[in-house]
Image (cartoon, rainbow, N blue to C red):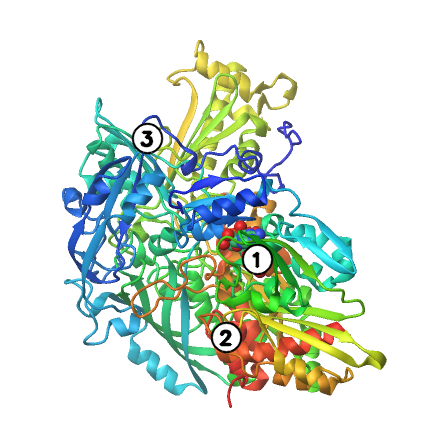
Amino acid sequence: MFPNRFEYRRPGSLAEAVQILAENPDAKLLAGGHSLLPAMKLRLAAPSTLVDLSQIEGLRGIAANGALTIGALATYNQVHDSAAVRQAAPMLADTCGIVGDPQVRVRGTLGGSLAHADPAADLTAVVLALGGEVTVVGSGGERTIAADDLFVDLLTTSLAPEEIITEIRIPDLAGAKMAYEKHEHPASGYAVVGVAAVLAMGDGGTIRSARLAVTGATAKATRLSSAEAVLAGKTVRTETIAAAAAAAADGLEINGDLYASADYRRHLVGVLTRRALERATG
Amino acid sequence: MSAILDPTRKLVGQPIKRREDPRLIAGAGAYLDDIKLTGMVHAALVRSTSAHGRIKSIDAGTARGMPGVLAVFTGEDFADLNPLPGAWTAGGVQNNVNTPRVLAIGEVHQVGDPVAVVIAENAYQAADAVEAVAVEYEDLGVVVDAKKATEDGAPQLHENAPNNVVLKWSCGKEAAEVDTALAAAEVRVQQHLVNQRLIPTSIEPRGSIGRYDPGTGDYTLWTTSQAPHVMRLLITAFVMGIPENKLRVISPDVGGGFGCKIFCYYDMALMLALSKKLDGRPVKFFEDRSENYLTTTHGRDHITDVEIGATKDGRITALKVDTHANLGAYFSTIAAGIPTTLYGRMVAGCYKIPNIRVDVTAVYTNTAMVDAYRGAGRPEAAFVIERVCDLVAGATGVDPAEVRRRNFIQPEDFPYDTGIGMLPYDSGNYEPALDRALEIVGYAGLRAEQAARRERDDRKLLGIGLSSYVEVCGVAPSKWIGLPGEGWGAGLWESANVKVHLTGKVVVTTGTLPHGQGHETSFAQLVADELGVPYEDIEIKHSDTLGTPFGFGTYGSRSAAVGGTAIYKSVAKVREKAKKLAAHMLEAAEADIVWEHGRAYVKGSPDAAKTIQDIALQAAVAYDLPGEMEPYLDETTYYDPPNCTFPFGTHVCVVEVDRETGEIALQRYVAVDDVGNVINPMIVDGQVHGGIAQGLAQALYEGAVYNDQGELVTGTMNDYAIPKASMVPTYELERTVTPSPTNPMGVKGAGEAGTIASTPAVANAVIDALAHLGVNHLDMPITPEKVWRAIGGGAS
Ligand SMILES: Cc1cc2nc3c(=O)[nH]c(=O)nc-3n(C[C@H](O)[C@H](O)[C@H](O)COP(=O)(O)OP(=O)(O)OC[C@H]3O[C@@H](n4cnc5c(N)ncnc54)[C@H](O)[C@@H]3O)c2cc1C
């Protein structure tokens, strides 16, 4: 439980942070620390330098203007308590209220969760289903990465080593129906399987488009494209939901572990898809 | 805090808030890792990555040159220290004892075995240097399963233990006799039961600080122990070969133990020996959670086959139990007593069963040592017999509550001898606890609801699980438990000294000690009542071998029944002496002295009373004492009880099981316990709460798993699921009170009852929910996936 030796830096600006990252290839950003520090204590991660983001201004704000903008350093609790988030994307606010335990929610950040890309994290699937995107700043300047392009593999994102997520944007989803359903691991609290569903509604109760994403079952948060295809253009009916649930796990490469086999996770993907759709539309 | 100065108010039975809590909650306690001594250095261990190997080489060259590193030692450097002692062998049978050394020499037998120790100026440097020590092993083959370990061709761990058998032990009738009874039974059931391995997970891990005084040759050990006096004895007499008086052992505040802190561990003697090698610099070792999970003892791990015979109306006529108990890589301090005396002799539970036979094979495997863990043998026994009751219910169609009722030992049968070598159960009245539990939970209504849901084919099935338990606490009579009997290497008495100082303040020193139980509060309540002094004037001192009389420690829910009685008797002695002195002071005959709430007066003249404080002053200044009376009110008792105590009760758990996912929701939990007389009901409730949580966690969440290489797969709290507050239901607690005749206070013990009762209650509830689907057993932890599969999920 004693990490390897490391340097600690606390830059006052993004530019300075980017520079430290560029100069120290083994450096790591420190946000809430609730993924990074446990890994360091177990000596599974041994960064040469920790770059603490906490003194950089402007990374915590939450603003709504049709679309929702959330600073990367906003904590789970801040997102959960934000009226703007609750209004624009209630599923996001709700999910931030069930991550880990109170200590985790006080310190853990939305940006940190997305950057860490834990295969069982909650917010990865939620932001993916919401069609979110992240703004990142690096030595090449600023760019935007859609959540669809952010998660590459187990604990791997498309961020360049010296890029920093500065904010998360959720598009205007007025009128959308959404819900996240999770089967929680009894030890870690992470998602054994979690399914987030967002339905953009058209006229007369038809589903204009659907975005569904799963976490926990696969190496990275993944869209449930078969279920989405079933739902698009249909009206909300029990049979439609059942058909989407039945198709949900199609094409997924599902992992198993000591707690839950791949078979069982596959089953949960279907059940939780149905439950998420029922709750979203209920 | 409200003052409890009024000595006429009876405190025993009052839910007084624990006096130790403000200190502990506010962070003002001193746990082992809070202790910092001048000149202290830090030890970290190089641990085996091989589960069974011959050490080919250890290269510490790089480590020795690293910043802050003072020394690196290996096992050979401590060849003069004996292996750790096995203190409790199973009575009457051969025990093939193999205990660990402070550091392994030659061979390792589990992942995590300490093979070298690094000493550095700080803990970070020590941890860095540990990584730089290179050790090579020759693989000797690994076995982790207790049954496979006994098969021919399995890797052999220790030379003196062929087929890895530590011991074979049995109790009850001859096998043939029980077989005959089984053959004659109207109903027969067989079941394979696995009581999975658990990791005790005290929130404070373990550790030691050793200090050697080169001037006097004395040693001091601070260690996270439930039994400092016993550690002193074992470390000096058995490991180091020095006189007992050369070592002082101090248990500071101890953050939970659940049994795993009873035992003699490698770090204790090692830190002392290291301090001597370092000319007296204090040396600290404190394990991290990963090390705790790897090498601090585990619990349970039984594989059992039961055969049951019963009548058609649910009376159990014969029970045959065959258990393989996995003891891990070595023989831990009291490991042999757990699956024998405390398990085998308790399998009758609260039932009259005419024919019982228990066979136990204890086995070495390449896993962490297994020893007492909260309940220690009794949870394993309760799990067997309470599953048996439900299996009989299933096979006969008799309601599970009725099966229990029909087989109960009756009130008039006490003291009751189960015929399998346990001491006679002291007292009991099992049916009222069962009735009350059923009444609180609304049993009939729940059965109707269960049937209705089944009828409607509801997604959420209802399950009701019962567990009527009896357990054994206050384990003692030295002549029963000791070497010639049950094999414990010493007696199991307890001691206490009570002094009333000149100022009237009372200091009690006890051999037993708390590691979370609240002794300082409960014992002070007891003394306040018995001596008639204000609660605030009483101090309970413990946990330091310097200044407390010898005690065997805190485990087996024995502190109140054995240690408390030692206090009670010392107080009585003080009172007797005080009465004598009061008679002298009041110029009256002792027979005419009335003692009331700490005041002594001549019958009929209460106004001219001498208070205990007056008397204590007189006793201390000693200007005017009668006859041969010695000064001071100061009395000690060494108390060896005539019997154990046998708490009991019935727990009922109600679960909802989601047929779709197998998810289990705990709906209700009702516990009606009988722990005899209660000193502090709030503390007892707390013990029951924690106990139930730990027990239900075995049923649903916890389970230590090794892979075939002997690596602990559940090596972190991310994988090993101890229950969080959000995972346990609200407990509905009540008590019946059947005082124990064993001790004058009538107390039994409450520290483990919750754990013992709850595992089968919860397991039975889940299985009950699925009974109509043909499920009659599920192995623990009963995870959603297991449920899902049991009812056909994933079948196609
Ligand atoms: C006990 C416990 C339980 C938990 N339970 C859950 C759970 O149920 N569900 C769940 O989803 N998570 C859970 N977590 C993880 C938690 O949500 C973490 O807080 C989160 O995964 C990481 O966020 P952080 O702010 O703590 O990031 P950190 O730990 O500080 O960083 C994580 C990684 O992201 C990088 N990083 C951080 N911020 C940025 C940024 N702005 N730009 C680029 N890279 C960045 C860091 O360099 C690091 O590599 C749990 C954690 C703990 C300790």
Chain holding disc 2: B
The image's mark for residue A113 is 1
The three-letter amino acid code for the residue at tag 2 is Cys
The answer to whether B9 appears left or right of A218 in the picture is right
Q: CA distance from mark 3 to mark 1?
A: 40 Å
Q: Residue furthest top?
A: B623
Indicate the quadrant where residue B295 lies: bottom left
Q: Nearer the viewer, mark 2 or mark 3?
A: 3
Report, in whole angstroms, how far the alpha carbon at label 2 lies from the one at label 3.
Answer: 56 Å
Kind of residue sitting beneath label 3: Met
Say which chain tag 1 marks. A
Neighbour class for label 1 at 10 Å: few (<14), some, many (≥20)? many
- What amino acid is labelled 1 in the image? Ser
Query: Considering the numbered disc 1 on the image, is that residue within a helix, a strand or a loop?
Result: helix
Provide the residue designation for mark 2.
Answer: B389
Is the same chain shared between marks 2 and 3? yes
Tell me the residue that label 3 is attached to: B40
Give the x, y percent position of residue B781. Answer: 48, 69
Q: Quick check: marks 3 and 1 in contact, CB under 8 Å?
A: no
The residue positioned farthest toward the bottom in the image shown = B796
Q: Is residue A191 left or right of residue B668?
A: left
Total numbered badges shown on the rendered structure: 3
Circle 3 crowding by C-alpha within 10 Å: few under 14, some 14–19, many from 20? many
As helix, strand or loop, the secondary structure at mark 2 comes to: helix
Judge by depth and name the residue closer to the eye, A111 or B4. Answer: A111
| Mark 3 on the same chain as mark 1 | no
Q: Residue at x 74, y 72 (%)?
A: A280
> Is the residue at mark 1 in contact range of ligand 1, meaning its CB lies under 8 Å from it?
yes
Q: Is residue A54 visible?
A: yes
Residue B156 % position (x, y): 19, 67
Do the residues marked 1 and 2 share a common chain? no
**B154 lies above or below B548:** below
